Amino acid sequence: MVAAAGYGLLFWKGTWWLDGSPVRSGNLQPADGVVITGLWTMLVALGAAVVVGSGPMYTHLNLQHARAKDLREAELARESLVTGRYGEAIKLLGSDKATERLGGIYVLERIMKDPEKDHWTVVEVLASFELVTRSCRNVMAGCDWCDDPAARGV
């Protein structure tokens, strides 16, 4: 804002500040008009160069912003996908059928390999799953989750 005001002031009064003696005295010669026109032409060219030169900078900043936004959206989409797969795997682990539980284990294995940050969460879930199934085998009866005799080891 200050630069624009300074540019306008220089355009308006610059000639009088730089070479104002003939203008103030009222004794203008044709050469003085050339000086005034030359200064104004230089200022217009300088203003055009600033405006045109700022275009690529604006485009670059806009592109960086769009890329960062796209990366955030891709990360959110990936997180949503992993969360859905994780929920489905937990449902499969809770199934009464051994093949579905095995499928849940394979889904968790796949989740564990994709994003490294989910690795320990999956390990903890599988360890808890093993702990629950092992305790069901030890109790053999009275465990609602292990209605399947094969899962109880009977």
Image (spheres, rainbow, N blue to C red):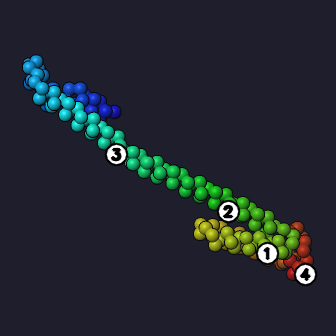
Judging by the rendered image, the residue that carries numbered circle 3 is 53
Specify which label sits upstream in the sequence, 3 or 1: 3
- 153 with respect to 86 (left or right): right
> SS of the residue at dot 4?
loop
Identified by mark 4, the residue type is: Val
Of the two numbered discs 3 and 4 in the rendering, the one whose residue sits closer to the viewer: 3
**Residue at numbered disc 2:** 82
Q: Give above or below for 6 relative to 103.
A: above
What whole-number distance in Å separates the C-alpha atoms at marks 3 and 4?
80 Å
Q: Which residue is mark 4?
A: 154
Dot 1 amino acid type: Leu
Query: Residue at the bottom extreme?
Result: 154
Q: CA distance from mark 3 to mark 1?
A: 62 Å
The quarter holding residue 90 reads: bottom right
Sooner in the amino-acid sequence: mark 4 or mark 2 = 2
Q: Around disc 4, counting alpha carbons within 10 Å, would you say few (fewer than 14), some (14 to 19), or many (20 or more)?
A: few
Q: Locate residue 35, reporting x and y percent.
A: 15, 31
Report crowding for label 1: few under 14, some 14 to 19, many 20 or more residues within 10 A (C-alpha). Answer: some
Look at the image and tell me in which quarter the N terminus lies: top left
Query: In the visual, does 147 lie left or right of 116?
Result: right
Residue 143 placed where, x, y %?
A: 87, 70
Label 1: which residue?
A: 102
Q: Amino acid at mark 2?
A: Val
Query: Residue 122: which quarter of the image?
Result: bottom right
The image quadrant that residue 39 belongs to is top left
Q: Secondary structure at mark 2?
A: helix
Residue 40 visible (yes or no): yes
